Structures are given as structure tokens and as C-alpha cells.
Amino acid sequence: MATASEVLALEELHQAAQARLGLAAAFLSLAEWETVSTLNAEATAALWLASSLRAIAAIRKMSRRLAVSYYQLTRALETGRTLGVPEGSTPRNVTLGVLRDNFREQAIDVASLPSTGTRSDDPDIRWFEETLQELDSRDNSNARAIRLADVPVEPLIQNLMDVEGSDDARPIQVDRFDWTKDMSLEEVERTFKDLLRKQAIEHSADKVKEIRADEDLATDIALDHIEVAHAAAGSIGSGTVDAAGMDGGREAIENAIRKDRLVKAVARGTSSDPCAFCAMLASRGFVYRNEKSAGLSEEIEKFHINCHCFPIVRFVRESELPEMNRYFQEKWSEVTRGLSGNEARKAWRRWIYAQRKANPEAPHGARKTK
């Protein structure tokens, strides 16, 4: 029972820490978007593009390391074996305490964002933490819509420590495995540069041309429309940075799931405020891989911008669903009773929308209703 409690607390902390990483990347991108001219995005977006790409590189590294340490600890708790040698260790000295410390250190680093200092030797992570701290000290009105405090990580670290077992000295066997490697900044640029340019810079420029071409609009109204369109383009860009960064951790877990024979079940892990689609996937429980399925379901790999979902991995046959999954599972049965197919999905979307409308300012963990 103690192990089950620790796994649930571990998953909740991992989910929150990954979400905070994504939001930190989005905050940086949105703050830098304020340097881009509303009237000429294409000529003034070089700084934003460079900063956003480097933020993706940094977040992918932090997300991957956090995800790997989560996976390694969960596997060790449930099987006594871990996957791959933890960073800074050798196969002979891996204990449960080593894995706990490794994950906790990763979570503490995320909880401290934005911080006044950094412990990382990685140049991209150091740049990200220092830039985030500098931007946080400014009056970035648009970026302030993103509140890192809405994803509390510190209490979840304490909660995990409260339920940890007293078996830190327990030796853990290490199964050989090559985890996915970090993307270099050059690889990030090749992968995401054109996407960011299209979704934010070109989107803003195209909207400006469209609005200016409308001769029926008064000048002041046209300028208002341009401001709105420009802000929307920046929001899309920051959401893309968020998603691309968090994909570093998601891809690492998905790759491990495909190759790890000890995996027994996979579910969609989500926050308390997901979109209707993600909440629906979370409600299905451990259906995305099990002993009867052939590989990993493609649905578990569907993520959108501003999506903070992550795969939940279990290595035992009988597993308790996390609280949010149980909540959405119960609500799905209630909301869609007597319905199926598209009608059920429509009813579900209406219910999700109603929850958000009723609690528009509710912070993380507060939108559940009876």
C-alpha cells in the first residue's frame, strides 16, 4: 500500500512539474513577443524566434530528464528493477534512495523557476533560467496572463516525501537501455524554426495585410484589430514553444514504453483543467497499452499546443487510477449516460465548457465539481 501511495504522489508531482516547465517556456516566449512590431512582424521577430528556439532546446532537456527520472523510479518501486543507469550513477550503486534523490532534485529545480541562480552546467538551461528570471522582473503585461503559481509544485514535493518508504538502501537492478538523447540547439532549429515562423510571424503578418486591405475599417478600428491579431499570433507561438519543449519528456517515455517488456498498463495523465479531448482520453483509464494490446495506442501520443498531458506508466497488473482519471471517468459515465459516438462527445464538450465558464479563474486543482 505504501508503494501504491508513493507511485500516485510521484505521478501527480511529475505531471505538475512538467506543466510548470511548459508554462515557463510559454511565459518566456510571450514576454519576448512584446519586442515584435505589431505592424511589421517579419522584420522585427529575429530576437523572439531565437529566444523561443533556445527555450525549446532548454525545456526539452529539462523535460526529458524529469521524465526519465520519473520512469526509472516508478519502475523500481513496482518491480525492483529500473531502466538504464541514472545520471551520475553506476549499475552497482543504484538504490531506491538514489532514484528518489534524482527525481526529487529534478522536481526542485523546476519548482524554483524562475530562480535567481542555477545549478545546471548546460549552457541552454543556464541561459533559460537566467533569461526567465530577468523577464520575470519586468512588467510584461501579456506574459503575466501566464501564472506559474497556478501549478503548485512545492506542496507536491512535500507530499511525495511524506509517503516515501523507509527503504532507501534497497538495491535496484538495472536493465540496460539507451534513453533518447537531448536535441542540440541546431537540431531544434532545424525541426521547429519554420513551424514557429509560420504559426506566429507569418500569421501576424498575414493578418495585418488582411486588415489593412479592408477599406471599410476606420483607422482606429483597424489598429485595434491588428493589436488583437498580433497578440493571438504570439499566443499561438508561445503555445507551440510550450508543446515542443514538453515533447522532450513525452517522447522519452513513449520510446521506453514501446521497448520495455515490463510495462503492464498506460493511461493518459492530465491536469485538472484539460480540454474536452484530453479529459475524454484520461477518462478511459489504462487502455493505451496492456498485455492484450499490440504496442502503444496512437491516441496516447496526440498532444496539442498548451497541452500538459503525459503518459502514466504502470508495471503491475492491478493499478489504481490517479484521482483526476477517476474523476473524469465518473463524470464521463454521468454526462454521457444513454449517449454514444458523436452525441456523447458533444455532451462531454458542453459539460467541460460549462465547468470552465463557471470557474474561469480557478487555479490548478480547483475546477472539479461534484
Image (tube, rainbow, N blue to C red):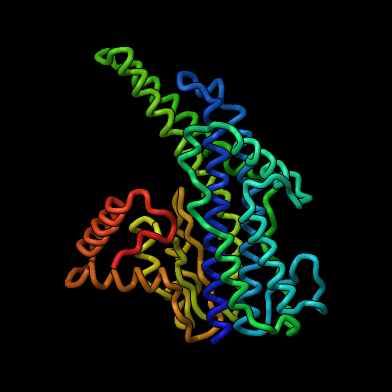
Q: Is residue 148 above or below residue 368?
A: above
Taking depth in this image into account, of 223 and 110 the one nearest to the observer is: 110
To which quarter of the image does residue 329 belong? Answer: bottom left
Position of residue 187 in the picture relative to residue 44 (left or right): right
Residue at the far left: name it: 338
| Residue visible at 31% across and 73% down in the picture | 330
Position of residue 291 in the picture relative to residue 229 (left or right): right
| Residue visible at 44% across and 33% down in the picture | 233
Residue 206: percent from left, percent from top: 41, 25
Q: Is residue 67 above or below residue 36?
A: below
Task: State the count of labels.
Answer: 0
To which quarter of the image does residue 158 belong? Answer: bottom right
Residue 128: percent from left, percent from top: 67, 43
To which quarter of the image does residue 193 belong? Answer: top right
Residue 185: percent from left, percent from top: 69, 43
Quadrant holding the C terminus: bottom left
